[in-house]
Image (cartoon, grey):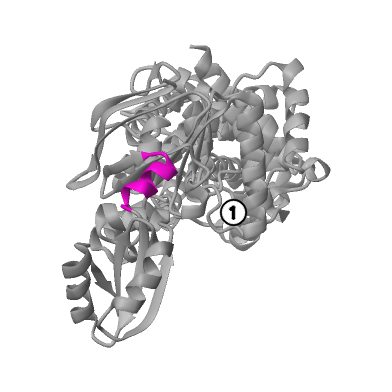
Amino acid sequence: MIIEVDGLAKHFGEIEAVKGVTFGVEPGEIFGFLGPNGAGKTTTINMLCTLVHPSAGSARVNGFDVRHERGEVRRSIGLVFQQTTLDEYLSAEQNLRFHAYAYGIPAELREKRMTELLNMVDLADRRKGSVRTYSGGMKRRLEIARGLLHHPKVLFLDEPTLGLDPQTRRLIWDYLLALRDQEGLTIFLTTHYMDEAEHSDRIAVIDHGRIVGMDTPIGLKRSVGGDLVTIAAADNQAAAAEITARYGAETTLRDGTVSFNVAHGAEFLPEFVRSFSQPLTSVMVRQPTLDDVFLHLTGREIRDSELDSQEQLLAGMARFRGRQARR
Amino acid sequence: MTEIFRGTWVVSYRELLRFINERSRLVGSFAQPLIFLVIFGAGFGNLIGAVAPGVDFIQFMYPGIIAMGVLTTALFAGVSVVWDREFGFLRELLVAPLGRTGIVLGKALGACVVALLQVSLMLLIAPIVGVRVEVSTVVRLIPIVFVLSTALSGLGLLVASFMRSQQGFQLLIQLLIFPLIFLAGVFFPINQAPDWLQVVSKFNPLTYGVDAIRQVFLGSDAGAQLGVTVLGHTMTLPEEVALMSVFAVVLLSIAAWAFNRQE
């Protein structure tokens, strides 16, 4: 395994940001950490990247211990953070060259690799331009190029497409997937975007500092227990009671609707509508999404947790420490 | 071990690159001391007259103004850390295989080189001020500027490692700068000031820097008359350089320790 994590935990004073996570990542895998803001994703990545000392537990990246062999870990990994970490007063080329010096890339390789990566992310014609003149998407592409300059084994992406438009997001993922296929790169990403998490080979769902589920995207969706049927009735309470009585399904009432899971929604629906006693005002069926997975595992939707006070506190602390997502 | 060397040179190289790229810094670092010199010199020159035999007020101030320029440049090492932290580049530094100590030393070395450049620019206006500049002057100034800027950048970096926000840092630096300058004998001779003022100024590395530069320009006799005494002993130039080196080592070590601990 190229990343091995065992009981990794971190607390900041009284706040337990990460409460003990254990998982492994295979080489060449795309591994996703899915969860709302404040769940502990960024703190976990920071521990794996040797930026933050773990409070407990252990982790090895590319075989090196994150506590005791930090230099070797750093040489094995590339990072793209939520926040831009480029020097805006220098040109793209100067930023890349600085990175090459910092990682001790030998002179013969340096210029060649820089050109290769600038071409890959389509910034070759803007290489001498000051980064200040770059758009958000261009900066992110440059950071990906920079993160890969020293041939890392693992690329860590912390919310890689946060704040970018859909077209740029797609472009970036095209590069990343090509990289994985061509160079056998392992990608570890954190995100709260479900469609982004879908790119992963495996996903760990993280909430309140703990992993609450880990599987392939398909596996996770299957664990929800079938398709999701959402109805609205004149009397939702009564409808819910009848559904449970008739079909033995657990119902969830929210936003004026009643939802429940059945094995084959499309086939189930016609019979249901015909035989249901309560008057129905709307009916919908769909396949489970990762948001449903999250709901199933935690009882909340990913976006609802923006209101959770602990996460607000953590997000506030992150801002105080200067890790605000700013584009 | 090579990590520290690479860290130091890579970080200082970037500091230099940034200084050159930013036109405003380039001009400002030279213009600020110049403005002080011109305005204070013109304003106070007639009022004060000769500070010591053969030394008018502008000639008395000139070395101090040079030292003041070194101060602002050196403190910028700390400012750059806080900026990098705020704008994210510090993360790139911390995650690279450079080592925290290398980063601290690199920032200090970068400030040193910039200070040396700045002082060379200041020397160009010496003839206008009426101060003689010879090769020996320049040669003797180099080690003084080197240890002074290292000591002061150590101070700036130390403050930066404890300040989380740019505003907090700016505030503290503003509070520090004026006492540091005024209690260093830039505008008035320290050894003629009240006792309590003299005591405080002895703990300021800039005091020794100003006096050392003054001795280089004005010669040891005038220098001695205006010189700094510690425990009754008038400090000679080599002694001042040595003392500043001690300041430099101590301050940088604490800054490096704080950096390794904090981030």
Horizontal side, residue B123 vs residue A201: left or right = right
Residue A216 located within the stretch drawn in magenta? yes
- Mark yes or no: residue B148 visible: no
Q: Main secondary structure of the magenta part?
A: helix
Q: Residue at x 22, y 62 (%)?
A: A249
Q: Residue at x 17, y 47 (%)?
A: A14
Chain on which label 1 sits: B
Looking at the rendered structure, the number of numbered marks drawn on it comes to: 1
Where does the image place residue B47, in percent across and percent down from the top left?
Answer: 57, 61
Q: In the rendered image, which quarter is residue A261 located in? A: bottom left
The quadrant of the rendering that contains the C terminus of chain B is top left
Q: Which residues are magenta?
A: A215-225
Q: Relative to B129, does residue B243 appear above or below in the rendering?
A: above
What amino acid does circle 1 point to?
A: Gly
Residue with the mark numbered 1: B49
Q: In the rendered image, which quarter is residue A124 located in? A: top right
